[in-house]
Amino acid sequence: MAKLSRTRSAGLLPRWLGRPLSWIARLLYNVSTSGLENLPECGGVLLVANHMSYVDGVVLQLACPRPVRFVGDDDYRRSHWFARRIFRLTGTIPLGPRSTLSGTRRILAALQAGEVVCMFPEGGISRTGQLMDLRPGYDWLAHRAGVPVLPVGHDGLWGSVFSFAGKKYLWKSPRLMPTSVFVAFGQPIPPEKLDATNVRQALLDLIQQAFEGRPLLRRNLAREAVRALAKRPWRVEIVDRTSDRREVRAGQLLAVAAALSRHIRKTIPDRRVGIVLPPGAGATIANLAVACAGKIPVNLNFTVGRAAQEACLRIGEVRTVISAEILKTKFSDFPWPADTRDMTSLVAAAGGKPAIIRWLVAVWLLPNQWLPALLGLPKVGDREEVSLLFTSGSSGEPKGVPLTHRNILANCSQISSLAILPDSATLIACLPVFHSFGCTVTLWYPMLRGCRVVTVPSPLDSRKIIDAIRDERASVMISTPTFMRPFLKKAEPAELKTMELLVTGSEKLPMELYEAFRERFNIEIMQGYGITEASPVTNINQPNPPIVTRSAKVQVGKSTGSVGRLLPGLSARIVHPETGEMLPLTSTGILCLRGSNIFGQYLRDEEKTKAAFLPGGWFYTGDLARFDSAGFLYIEGRLSRFSKIGGEMVPHGTVEQCLNDAFAWDPSEAPKVAVVGVPDATKGEQLVVLTTEKITPSDVRERLLAAGLPALWVPKVVCHVAHIPVLGSGKLDLRACKLLAIGVADSC
């Protein structure tokens, strides 16, 4: 067996050097820990940890009361003279293709000698900000040495100069204050119970636990937005293309919102204030002003039916709405409350230009820390409600989703950590602000992060969006597949040449749309996943990170057909849809999520809240999904979009896609077909096809069987309708579709 490095029990730093370096490290890093009772007091143990920066080892040693011997990348050691010195000085064991045998022997010797050895199974520093795929080898070492594996998750080092945040190492502005880092030690896993799935599960849980310790999450959202805007008062924040092009600088936005917030606080007694405005400067100012007034903005959906709108007003106890006269005329069927205030008139009542100029001078002259105090904003928001959104109601009455300061700050921090929306980005904001992506990603995130926003009032106005991308040289856009289809017919490749990232969510990305965009525009659509209850983003694909050092390994940030890896700070479970039994992450079942961005409860609905959460705080998404071994999530469908027929789960979406393909229908303008499950006296449930096309049940059977679908999956009832019900987001209105199918199935 190979000998350990000379001197010092673990080959760690000598005392004369270790103590001063430890003092310096403690000045730079404020390290908190949990789970130290899980670390054996003596005997060999193999730590496996996530790898986020060059100083992970320093922080883990500060957190661990026992000396730790680290395992490092031999290729990195060979390529850098400084790394060779550090490896030799600290007794780090090099392991790589050219040192597999010697490195393995030294690791086994250390473990059998009773030492704590730490490995980073990702094989290198993550360059995506997410937990990468875990390479094998640590499990064999634990088996051979007969020692437990202790998973360790840490958070706080991504974004430091020693991480790859911003797509570069070192050449970043250093943090002026000590970095808060949280390290969570998990339960030891015996060698006989080791596999890649449960180790990944444990690491995700621990990283999520560590993320919860971020001090940022306790802050007040409005206060953070005010401070961020005040730091860049001259920067163009919004290019509003609602009618005439208008630039709004950060200082102007903040000054108007500040003046308006004082007026709202004095004249609106209610806790929640409704907002009915399209994406633009007005919606941003209204949301910030309401939040600065200490009240809760409620962005209301003006595209759904009147019954759903009345339900939202009732559930949210909204009696005052901020809107515009033109919208009151356009949406005359909306149940406008008696106290509906015009945005322009409201600004005038708040003092108009004189009040705005006074605040503008304050923004220009005062330190950014003073402005929140002038507005009376508290430092702590944490778990207090700060925004109320409503689910789309695609399968029932809309549910109120109160989001807290912690929820939105966490999701913005998670998105920021991926470096897909840097402050240099120009973001197209066309999703309505009542849409969860529109509210967090294109309204609050830019205020906090500083990327420029170009607003277009409707996601349906493809020509206007294309013009905005071309004229403003936009680089990033978040949309849905439904809203992106018209681009194939209306846009020229030159008009989209500045686009660097196009992300779709809300519905599954069809492969034919993905391929068409790549072929016509040379743009690879990145699919993501989110739900209103998660504030909303949980997963996203991102471009593969660049290789900038000689020793760096290839890392993958995307996987075709998936919705990407989990954002940092989120963990997941897969449970059986009928028994609720926990399954391996790689099995197909119901996706459950836990993290700082997950909401706490539905508004005024204890029954639905109880049904939405499993023990341990796991949110039951209702989506059938699975992870692959590299951590990419694949959404198989929504449970409500399955019918159990003959003991088999039949996916409606798959049948719809096969019908579109079999009949060569182009759903780019409007959906041609919807498959719905309705009650059946003999089988419990039967499939009904709602379609705007003239087809017969025999046509459906012939085409679907020819496409290879099982006979059990073939609908026997076809109903012809004038149009397929859809929501304002472009998704099918499942509730309306089902009511329509039940109403006409007997006569079809």
Image: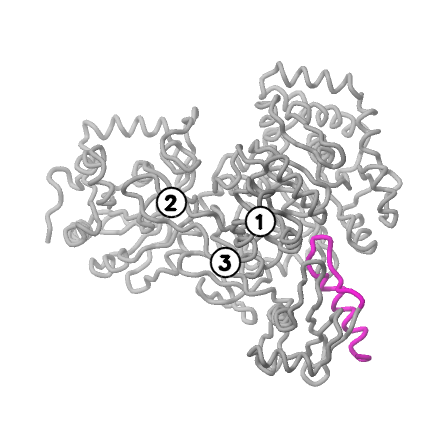
- The residue tagged 1 is 598
Q: Nearer the viewer, mark 3 or mark 1?
A: 3
Q: CA distance from mark 2 to mark 3?
A: 20 Å
Q: CA distance from mark 3 to mark 1?
A: 21 Å
Q: How is the image coloured?
A: one colour
- The residue tagged 3 is 562
Which label number is shown at residue 478? none
Q: Nearer the viewer, mark 2 or mark 3?
A: 3
Label 3 element class: loop
Residue 306 % position (x, y): 83, 54
Residue 691 % position (x, y): 74, 70
- The residue tagged 2 is 126
- Relative to 426, is 277 on the left or the right? right
Q: Is residue 120 magenta?
A: no
Say what amino acid the circle numbered 1 marks: Ile
Q: Could you say which is closer to the camera, residue 710 or residue 587?
A: 710
**Nearest to N terminus: mark 3 or mark 1:** 3
Say what amino acid the circle numbered 2 marks: Ser
- Relative to 380, is 144 on the left or the right? left
Residue 237 drawn above or below residue 535: above
Say what amino acid the circle numbered 3 marks: Ser
Label 2 element class: loop
Tags 2 and 3 touching, CB below 8 Å: no
Label 1 element class: loop
**Nearest to N terminus: mark 2 or mark 1:** 2
Q: Count residues near mark 3 (Cα–Cα under 10 Å), then give few for <14, some for 14-19, many for 20+.
A: many
Q: CA distance from mark 2 to mark 1?
A: 25 Å
Q: Which residues are magenta?
A: 722-748
Q: Could you say which is closer to the camera, residue 135 or residue 248?
A: 248
Query: Where does the C terminus fall, quadrant-wise?
Result: bottom right
Residue 367 % position (x, y): 58, 17
Query: Where does the N terminus fall, quadrant-wise?
Result: bottom left
